[in-house]
Amino acid sequence: MPPLLLGGIDTAATLGFNLTDEGGARAAMVNIPQEVEIPGVPGVIFSGPFIVRLREYRIRGYLDGASKAAVQANLLKLQALCGDGNEVAVVFGDWATVQLPSVCVEMPGKNYPVNSRGNSQNEIPFYVEMLFRADNPFWQDITPQAINFTSTHTNMPQGTAPGFPVLTSPVGALTTPQLKGWDHNDVELWSCTLASLGAGEQYRITTAPGVMTIEKFTGGVWVVSDGSKTAGVFPKILSSNGVAYQTSAWPKLSASTGTWVSTYPRQWR
């Protein structure tokens, strides 16, 4: 099994944790329509819209070391690492460029023998099972991409799940900048027109659901400036699916003036 990294810590090298079961960590998360059950009608009726469920998975393994005391000390470190209810980055060593930020909600453990001899209380290894929940069920790049785009329609490479870019303008005067989204065939999907920027000013647009906002750097500080959108729609997320991933048929972005930057981690189901 590959080594398990939690919060950047190699649990095998540092804590003597031997991963034995990844659980459903790498199971595919799929779009499914919402469903309704009607008494007297067999099965369910798909009512839509499509949803992607929370990812819940269990990781199992055992701590091993030179002595029972050493294993117990490492168990306390493992509990401190991911047992306080905070989000931790889960990474498997054979796909070390992506992470799945998750919260550990259960961590049962027990002594157990690695062979059939002796009492488990006398064995050094300690079995651990960790239940994780990821509110964003998609694996994502540890290092986000930063892609420049101008008036030329520029590809935004994706994984197999949508991406949520942060769009940043250049610093300085821009006259009514217009952002546009395109599909891989250069068909326009949406446009957004913004108020002009003065010298020393800058836009930063966050497209992540639940965060979506337009900020302006002005007077030396960032301020929320959603009213700066003067026409069109709010910039949309970067859509993706399995076919797009296989054929490199990426969505594209363009800006009417200046060189903008689209920063986002690719995501996989």
Image (spheres, rainbow, N blue to C red):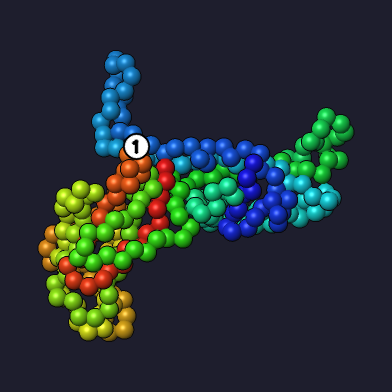
Image vertical order of residue 173 relative to residue 51, above or below: below
Taking depth in this image into account, of 145 and 38 the one nearest to the observer is: 145
Q: Kindly identify the residue that appears in the image at 31 percent across and 76 percent down.
A: 222
Residue 264 or 226: which is nearer the viewer?
A: 264
Q: Tell me the residue that label 1 is attached to.
A: 31
- Secondary structure category for the residue under label 1: loop
- Quadrant location of the C terminus in the rendered image: top left
Q: Is residue 144 visible?
A: yes
Q: Tell me what residue is drawn at x 17 percent, y 67 percent.
A: 256
Residue shown at the point (27%, 65%) measured from the top left: 149
Above/below status of 223 relative to 143: below
Q: Residues within 10 Å of mark 1 (few under 14, many from 20)?
A: few
Q: Which of the two residues, 255 or 27, is positioned nearer the viewer here?
A: 255
Name the quarter where the N terminus is drawn: top right
Across and down, in percent, residue 221 comes to: 32, 80
Picture coordinates of residue 154, whole percent (x, y) = 26, 59
Q: Is residue 213 left or right of residue 133?
A: left
Residue pictured at 81% horizontal, 32% vertical: 115
Q: Residue 120's spot in the image, x, y percent?
A: 82, 36
In the visual, does 56 lie left or right of 196? right
Q: Amino acid at mark 1?
A: Asn
